[in-house]
Image (spheres, rainbow, N blue to C red):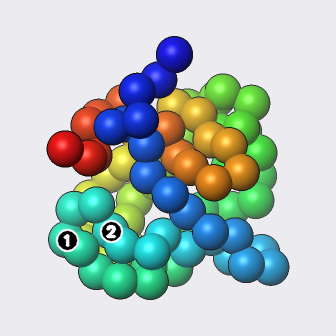
Amino acid sequence: MLNFEHSWPYEKMMDDIYINECPYCHTSNVLTTFSEDKLNNAKEGIKQLLVMPCCHSKLTILNADEDYFWTEEKLRS
């Protein structure tokens, strides 16, 4: 089971996936380059890489649900 500290919320609007705030540089309303196919793979438990367009930091997504990306690193304190 994944710990909540290793999660980050996202929102899906139409075909776009937004992150309210980047966990690394704290930029607001980040439009990601994450595709619908990658999101579906993440929901099936297939590891995906998301490069944040704002600061080019890499977020490894282990799983996803309808509201959160679940990652291998601690993003919350």
Q: Is residue 32 above or below residue 2?
A: below
- Asked if residue 51 shows in the view, the reply is yes
Kindly identify the residue that appears in the image at 51 percent across and 16 percent down. 1
Do we see residue 71 in this rendering?
no
**Residue named by callout 2:** 22
Depicted 44 relative to depicted 19: above or below:
above
Q: Which residue is mark 1?
A: 25
| Location of residue 26 with respect to 71 vertically, above or below | below
Query: Is 67 situated left or right of 4 in this image?
Result: right
- Badge 2 vs badge 1, beta-carbon distance below 8 Å: yes
Residue plotted at (55% across, 63% down): 10
- Amino acid carrying label 1: it is Cys
Q: Look at the picture and state if 45 lies above or below 7.
A: above
Element class at badge 2: loop
| Amino acid bearing label 2 | Cys
Residue 19 in the image: state x and y as whole percent: 48, 70
Question: Relative to residue 70, is residue 11 drawn left or right?
Answer: right
**In the image, residue 16 lies at what x, y percent?**
68, 76
Of 14 and 51, the residue lying toward us: 14
Q: Is residue 22 left or right of residue 43?
A: left
